[in-house]
Image (spheres, rainbow, N blue to C red):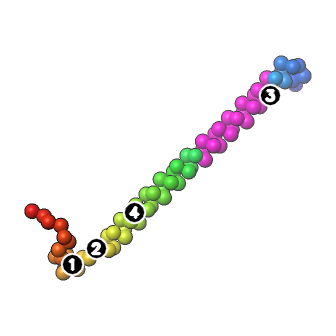
Amino acid sequence: MFSILLTPLGRAAAVVIVLTLAFGGLYVKIRSDAIAEVQAKATADALGRVQNAVRAGDSVDTSSSGLLKDDGHRRD
């Protein structure tokens, strides 16, 4: 089994296999990092939208006089 590594063709094949595995592992690592980054951005965006909605809901005047105030929009 190891005697094949002593031949020039065996060494070349071993180098090709090692390089393929190294570049394959690098590709998988970069891809998984990119996926994690996209998911983190999406989560941060969703959290920001939820926080904005909560702030908007908190700023609404729900008192009895506040609900009858004119908001400046004409409705027919």
Numbered label tally: 4
Residue tagged by mark 4?
50
Span of residues in magenta: 13-33
Can the viewer see residue 21?
yes
* Camera-side mark, 3 or 1: 1
Of 52 and 24, which appears nearest the observer?
Answer: 52
In the image, what residue type sits under mark 3? Val
Q: Earlier in the sequence, mark 4 or mark 2?
A: 4
The tag earlier along the polypeptide, 3 or 1, is 3
Neighbour tally class for label 3: few under 14, some 14-19, many 20 plus, Cα within 10 Å: few
Q: CA distance from mark 3 to mark 2?
A: 68 Å
- Labelled pair 3, 1 in contact (Cβ < 8 Å): no
Return the residue at label 3. Answer: 15
Q: Nearer the viewer, mark 1 or mark 4?
A: 1
Q: Mark 1 and mark 4: span between their CA atoms?
A: 24 Å
Real-space Cα distance between discs 4 and 3? 52 Å
Mark with earlier residue (3, 2) = 3
Q: Crowding at label 4, few (<14), some or many (≥20) Cα neighbours within 10 Å?
A: few
Q: For this view, does 22 lie left or right of residue 9?
A: left
Residue type, numbered disc 1: Gly
> Is residue 55 found inside the magenta-colored segment of the image?
no
Q: Quarter-wise, where is residue 15 in the image?
A: top right
Q: Which mark is residue 60?
A: 2
Say which residue label 1 marks.
66
User: Marks 1/2: CA distance?
Assistant: 9 Å
Q: Amino acid at mark 4?
A: Val
Secondary structure at numbered mark 3: helix
Give whichever of discs 1 and 4 has the lower sequence position.
4
Q: In the image, what residue type sits under mark 2?
A: Val
Contact (Cβ within 8 Å) of mark 1 with mark 2: yes
Which SS class for mark 2?
loop
